[in-house]
């Protein structure tokens, strides 16, 4: 009898312990979940508060831009390897190759050792490249402005001349035509608001080399860079929507701000903001984006986007996005 009671007590005690433990675990889980959702909310909020966007710290650091002699490369057949620069573990070509950087890519400058620059790439790889494959520069980009007329924006109508870009399903509408028309509308809208605009081409027959596009932007003391494109997919009517691309971390806030405005009034599918290693983006230092504003070989997209209304919507969204980016919205 005594024994049994003790056993019962033991059983009861164990049950109590279990309940207690479950209670504690439950409390911790609920507490952490709550905490996590608060964190997420704060992060999400931070990305839309313009003040946070303006705090960018990329203006005074020295950079090293990787350089490859690409003058003899055929853009259509060249592979990534043709544009690559090896990154060594130490300041010696006989040390291990730990990765590569690419022509035009800006890396943080971490010092000089003999014939080498020590760099940190946008992917956070730290190593050495030969000086002959690097150009050291200090970039200063104005990050706070008082009014729009302090701004210079480079607009790049993708393709041009013999490079017609994507085609629609009837093969009569060229991407190069739409990008130029769109860019002209954007130019008009930005200029009316006081912004200085530089175009990388102004004529249908004109083609500007990709490296030249970045050069124009880097040399113009521009604040922002926007490249305009219309998309294409291997199969007709299988892909749809618009995308905003950026490459460097310091372009992410600009990409998000413009994309938010675009998404507000665009009836096409939203493919979101994505990172892409496009030459015009990686070679351009200032905050830059590449817009794919819809699929040319999607008949539904085309009907909507091949209109003056759509181009004006894009222009208005870009102006509103720039105002938000600099915290100048009315
Ligand atoms: Zn294109």
Image: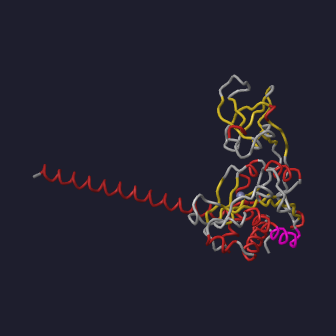
- Which of 105/30 is in front? 105
Toward the bottom, the furthest residue is 309
**For residue 106, above or below residue 161:** above
Please name whichever residue, 304 or 148, is drawn nearer the observer in this view of the structure: 304
Total labels drawn:
0
Ligand 1 placement by image quarter: bottom right
Q: Is residue 3 left or right of residue 13?
A: left
Q: Is residue 267 magenta?
A: no
Q: Which residues are magenta?
A: 184-194
- Measured as percent of width and height from the top left, residue 170 is found at 65, 67
Tell me if residue 329 comes above or below residue 274 in the rendering: below
Identify the residue shown where x is 79% and y is 61%.
157
In the rendered structure, the answer to whether residue 268 lies left or right of residue 136 reads: left
Name of the residue lying farthest toward the top: 94
Q: Is residue 192 magenta?
A: yes
- On the image, the x and y values in percent for residue 22 come to 35, 56
Colour logic? secondary structure
Residue under the point 74% across and 45% down: 75
In this rendering, is residue 138 above or below 175? above
Quadrant of the rendered image containing residue 296: bottom right
Q: Position of residue 54 (x, y in %)?
A: 77, 59
Look at 81% across and 71% down and name the residue there: 185
For the point 60% across and 66% down, the residue is 240
> Could you say which is closer to the camera, residue 276 or residue 236?
236
Decide whether the magenta segment is chiefly helix, strand or loop: helix
Residue 181: x and y, percent?
79, 68
Q: Nearer the viewer, residue 173 or 151?
A: 173
Q: Quadrant of the C terminus?
A: bottom right
The outermost residue toward the left is 1
Which quadrant of the structure image shows residue 102? top right
């Amino acid at each position: 009898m005594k024994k049994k009671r003790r056993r019962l007590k033991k059983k009861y005690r164990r049950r109590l312990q279990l309940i207690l433990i479950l209670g504690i675990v439950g409390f911790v889980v609920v507490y952490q979940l709550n905490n996590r959702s608060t964190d997420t909310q704060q992060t999400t909020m931070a990305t839309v508060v313009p003040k946070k966007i303006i705090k960018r710290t990329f203006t005074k650091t020295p950079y090293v831009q990787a350089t490859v002699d690409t003058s003899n490369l055929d853009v259509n057949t060249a592979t990534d390897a043709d544009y690559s620069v090896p990154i060594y573990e130490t300041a010696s070509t006989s040390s291990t190759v730990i990765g590569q950087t690419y022509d035009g890519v800006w890396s943080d400058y971490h010092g000089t050792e003999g014939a080498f620059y020590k760099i940190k790439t946008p992917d956070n790889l730290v190593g050495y490249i030969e000086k002959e494959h690097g150009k050291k520069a200090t970039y200063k980009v104005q990050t706070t402005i008082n009014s729009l007329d302090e701004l210079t924006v480079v607009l790049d109508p993708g393709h041009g001349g013999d490079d017609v870009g994507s085609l629609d399903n009837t093969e009569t509408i060229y991407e190069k035509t739409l990008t130029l028309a769109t860019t002209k509308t954007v130019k008009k809208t930005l200029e009316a608001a006081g912004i200085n605009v530089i175009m990388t081409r102004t004529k249908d027959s004109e083609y500007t080399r990709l490296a030249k596009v970045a050069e124009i932007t880097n040399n113009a003391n521009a604040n922002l860079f926007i490249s305009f494109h219309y998309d294409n997919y291997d199969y007709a009517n299988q892909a749809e929507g618009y995308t905003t691309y950026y490459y460097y971390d310091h372009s992410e806030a600009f990409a998000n701000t413009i994309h938010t405005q675009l998404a507000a009034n665009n009836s096409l599918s939203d493919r979101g903001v994505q990172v892409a290693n496009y030459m015009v983006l990686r070679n351009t230092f200032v905050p830059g984006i590449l817009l794919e504003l819809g699929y040319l070989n999607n008949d539904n997209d085309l009907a909507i986007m091949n209109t003056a209304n759509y181009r004006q919507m894009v222009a208005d969204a870009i102006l509103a996005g720039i105002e938000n980016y600099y915290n100048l919205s009315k």
